[in-house]
Amino acid sequence: MNNKIKYLLIALVTIPILSCQEDFLERTPTDAISAADALANEDNMQLVLNGVHRGLFSQSQTVFPGGDSGRANNHYWVPLGDNLTGDLIHSANANNLSWRSAMQWNEHSQPTSLTSRLLWYHRYNIILHANLLINEIESGSLTETDGLNTILGQAYTYRAYAYLSLVQHYAKGYLIGNPSTDPGVPLLYSSESPFTSEPRSTVQEIYDQIGGDLEAAIAAFEAAGATDSVSGASASEKSQLTIDVAQGLKARWALSKGDWQTAADAAAEARIGYPLLDESGWKSGFNTNELSEVMWGSNVISTETTFFRAYFYLASNTFNGSQIRNNPKIADRRLVDAIPDSDYRKDVFLPDAPNTNTSASNGEGGWDNNTNPKYSTEEEFDAATDSIKSVYGLVSGHNLHPYMHFKLKQANPGSTDPDDIIYMRSSEMYLIEAEAELMMNNLGAAKQALQPLAEARNSEWDMDDYATEGEFFEHLKFQWRVEMWGEGFGYTNHIRWDEGVDHAADGGSGASEVLYQQSYQIDKPSVNDDWVFKIPQAEIDANPNLGPGDQN
């Protein structure tokens, strides 16, 4: 990597270990634990792995020098996918953590932005630690055990996860470009200084690396005697990566590259043991890994001071922070209005919520500007406001807005508590399998793949309502958007489907053109290179293998 990152990564080897178990430090008299000590035995390797787990959700400066308190890693990166595509809509002007700036496409499109820089460094941080573990275990210096193979499986899975994230953000989409020639991202193999990397490999080479890592991960888990997990695992247990997570990532990887059969098979295998949520579970807030569908997520520990850097601070209308109180997040009204009344997912969106925010971007906030005929008097307007705040645990300072959501709800609403971050659910696997089958022109199989999920959510769902592949594809995209709303899939879905953003079409989304500016209407990814993140300018400046011509 570049000179800057070389020095960052030297320190990175030690920080996660120190932060996870203090007595390890007490046994080591030096200020930093060497790589040799970190890899001396299986227990120490698990500490390294635990540090990577924690690094997924901690504030970035606590994981590596040169980070920044403005990002708590996946607390930001997960909802960013829906923030960029206008699925998670801002109702008012608020820019804490550059969340508005990111929504307006003024972050990822700038090579000097914090967003472009920290996503890059965080993913390479994961790759470094994966390399550290993989290189040592594969050297054969330690006795093979089930525990060691489990660590190896997690390391390979992490490396695949990081490269998939990098290539999907910093390179052109596989299905809309020319993977064999499109520049991807640098490959990093080393685990010790000087951490030199390759030049930018092609998109195809990165995808091949990911595929190889996932196969190696699955083989390692199988060597450890891994079987399909069960949904009753604890929140902390689900922060560990399993063979199911590797299969789930394989399904994502294959879907994004058009390897439809592999995607369908991997998705069907991955979801075994993770039963679909019932209505009460689905409406409970998606704030814990303990939900039956959750295959993988970060179990956010209370001592990690994310708070006003948290996922729910950016996306959940129950969080007691100014980003939410002043700017309640809403869903696209075209999507919400299309949800049938027989589908209980509609209940988490409030189309008729009073607009109490006099700073709302649509200029309709407060009783004096009320346009909803449901409230004919100020008393009715105020009563509805009080009722919603009481039901959902909001504080007096929380504003309301039509089409606000309560899909993401804190376990302790009205607080600043950061909850778990969910990365993978079995619902996604049903959607992947259905899409893959449809892309293979297997309409009947696609309907059958979606049926368990669709019927679980909508008591009146009928596969016979969709007679053609085109009709079913539009319905499947609708199911993706409703089921996974707020969980960050908007960005990768838009790239895979080659769809732009249009808040004005079909009566409008409810977003304000004045607020959204250039992101109010965005051309589809195949004709608009702004969908590709800029490589950090610091990397371009310092990496001898990259030059100005490598910038996206």
Image (cartoon, rainbow, N blue to C red):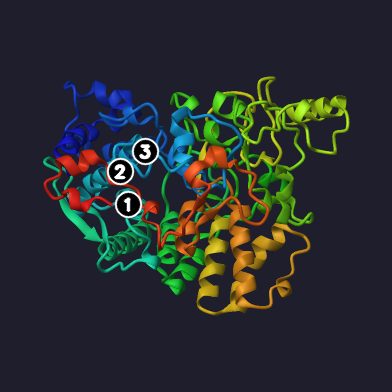
Q: Which residue is mark 2?
A: 120
Which secondary structure lies at badge 1? helix
Count residues near mark 1 (Cα–Cα under 10 Å), then give few for <14, some for 14-19, many for 20+.
many
Q: Is residue 238 visible?
A: no
Q: Earlier in the sequence, mark 3 or mark 2?
A: 3
Residue at (37% x, 57% y) in the render: 221
Closer-to-camera residue (302/370): 370
Q: Give the mark, 2 or 1, whose residue is nearer the N terminus.
A: 2
Give residue 198's position: percent from left, percent from top. Answer: 16, 54
Q: Amino acid at mark 3?
A: Thr
Disc 1 to disc 3, how far (Cα)? 12 Å
Kindly report which numbered mark, 3 or 2, lies closer to the viewer in this rendering: 3
Q: Is residue 369 above or below residue 501?
A: above
> Type of residue at label 2?
Trp
The residue singled out by tag 3 in the image is 115
Q: Amino acid at mark 1?
A: Tyr
Disc 1 designates what residue? 170
